[in-house]
Image: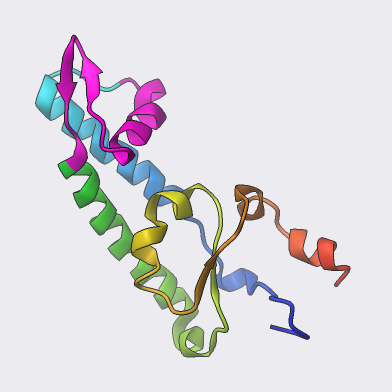
């Protein structure tokens, strides 16, 4: 924080996109194990949305429950992401004013990540995850 404005430490920032990819792959594997058929990649996002809402995936008229695979994937991904982020932050971890989550990954894993990091907040819109330097432009800082 400088003068009440959060200043991101770019070398300490990371993305949860890798976690989303791993979750999609885990759900695809679970789907294939239960149905014997591969889950088309174009169905990954829809499958994640249904599973997140505790709804089954309908395949050939049958409801396929992937909630157990989703919960296991969440735990494993959060452990991986958390350990990587904390390792990259190193000895700065205890001195951070806040941890800001932005973008799709925070929507999918925020409730679990919130328990791992201190003083967390969630950006109001996913665009903040994609806008490098947006904060500096918006505040007029250079």
Residue sitting at 63 percent across and 74 percent down? Answer: 9
Res 81 seen here:
no
Residue sitting at 20 percent across and 33 percent down? Answer: 29
From the top left corner, tell me how far across and down residue 72 is, in percent.
19, 51
| Name of the residue lying farthest toward the top | 60
Q: Quadrant of the C terminus?
A: bottom right
In the image, the segment drawn in magenta is 40-67
From the top left corner, tell me how far across and down residue 58 is, in percent.
23, 18
Residue sitting at 25 percent across and 36 percent down? Answer: 27
77 up-or-down from 6: above or below: above
3 up-or-down from 51: above or below: below
Q: In which quarter of the image is residue 77?
A: bottom left
Res 141 seen here:
yes
From the top left corner, tell me how far across and down residue 105 is, in percent.
46, 51
Q: In which quarter of the image is residue 37?
A: top left
From the top left corner, tell me how far across and down residue 70 is, in percent.
24, 44
With 128 as the anchor, is 106 left or right in this view?
left
Q: Quadrant of the N terminus?
A: bottom right
Residue 58: in magenta span:
yes
Residue 13: in magenta span:
no
């Amino acid at each position: 924080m400088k003068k009440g404005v959060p200043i991101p430490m770019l070398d300490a920032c990371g993305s949860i996109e890798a976690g989303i990819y791993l979750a999609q792959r885990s759900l695809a594997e679970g789907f294939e194990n239960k149905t014997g058929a591969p889950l088309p990649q174009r169905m990954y996002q829809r499958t994640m949305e249904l599973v997140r809402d505790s709804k089954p995936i309908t395949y050939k008229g049958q409801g396929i429950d992937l909630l157990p695979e989703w919960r296991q994937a969440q735990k494993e991904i959060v452990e991986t992401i958390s350990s990587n982020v904390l390792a990259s932050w190193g000895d700065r971890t205890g001195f951070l004013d806040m941890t800001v989550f932005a973008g799709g990954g925070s929507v999918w894993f925020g409730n679990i990540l919130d328990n791992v990091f201190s003083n967390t907040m969630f950006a109001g819109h996913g665009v903040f995850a994609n806008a490098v330097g947006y904060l500096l432009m918006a505040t007029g800082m250079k």
